[in-house]
Image (cartoon, grey):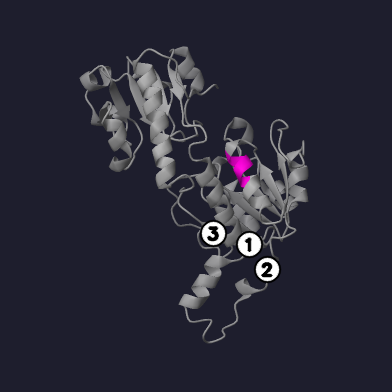
Amino acid sequence: MASQVLIYSRFPKKQMLRIGERFDLLDAAGKPPHEVLGADQLAGVRALITAGGQPLGAEVMASLPRLGAIVCYGTGYDGIDLAAAAARGIVVGNSPAANAGAVADLALTLMLAATRRVVAADQYVRSGGWVTSKPSPMLSAPRELAGARVGVYGMGEIGRRVAARAAAFETEVAYHSRSRHDVPYPYFDCLADLVAWCDILIVAVRAGADTQHIIDADMLKKLGPEGTLVNIARGSVVDQQALVAALRDGAIGAAGLDVYEAEPHAPDALTELPNVVLTPHIGGHTAQSHLRMQDCVIANLGAFFAGEPLPYPVRG
């Protein structure tokens, strides 16, 4: 069919149902397309749907001779070689802000869970520690959020919603990003100064070569032994090895993570630590967010096959 679309990443089938009603989908199930589909099938692919964080380089594009559009299911597009796509005249689209509110909700959930030690408290009740009055160092009295300093790294759609939600808890909010924005929060033009200032650092920056491991051992030391790190951006932004050491050695107090350097994240030294709250990259995973992301995918594909500009293009 003229509207043949490759599902490049692994997605639950129900997330593709609405899209499949409009377009002819070929599912590679997250495997290299040439291992699943024949050359004649790949030759008919004109567009593909991908999770933006999954690597998608020039070699894959070259295996799809008619490929004209890459459409990200979600906001991120850091896995795509944009230069290679541009060189071949392939347009790239995403779903901007479609899941911003949901991701911001989870950022605050992780912040609250980490600072109020919700996981440790839950385990204390389930294990019988409460009923036997067993001492628990993890349940020493934490500070409350009112008056805490929350630093937001990144002030895009997600960062703005994170900041607004954090401010509702009577915190002081400030931010750092590549440029100053028209928002009612103080701006730090140096990330290190923001980290040194805040009690809680929430990472909401877009991933890229310029942010790779930017939150490293020195930054974590600036956050301090009472500090909390929350990352709902990409795992690449934080040096995970340095984070494990900082949590273990008390260089910072706690962390809440929805993203990791390697996903899915297998049990390791990080998962053994009691002062970290972990979720499996579910920031944008709400029923409403999926509908909005699907709407963006359908709109981008529809415009591409109609020979029109993408309504939600990525401008690298």
- Foreground pick, 162 / 80: 162
Q: Which mark is residue 277?
A: 3
Inspect the magenta stretch and tell me whether residue 161 lies in it.
Answer: yes
Q: Which mark is residue 142?
A: 2
Tell me the kind of residue under disc 1.
Thr
Which of the 4 image quadrants contains residue 64?
A: top left
In this rendering, which labeled residue sits more in front, label 3 or label 2? 2
**Callout 3: few (<14), some (14-19), or many (20+) C-alpha neighbours within 10 Å?**
many
Image marks 2 and 1: residues in contact by CB distance under 8 Å: yes
Please say whether residue 64 is visible from this viewpoint.
yes
Please say whether residue 60 is visible from this viewpoint.
no
| Looking at the image, residue 300 lies above or below residue 216 | above
Tell me the kind of residue under disc 3.
Val
Q: Which mark is residue 305?
A: none
Cα distance between the residues tagged 3 and 2: 16 Å
Which residues fall within the magenta stretch?
A: 158-162
Q: Disc 1 designates what residue?
A: 115
Q: Residue at x 31, y 27 (%)?
A: 6
* Earlier residue among tags 1 and 3: 1
Tell me the element at label 3: strand
**Callout 2: few (<14), some (14-19), or many (20+) C-alpha neighbours within 10 Å?**
few
| Looking at the image, residue 27 lies above or below residue 101 | above
**How far from the left and from the top, in percent, is residue 258?**
51, 50
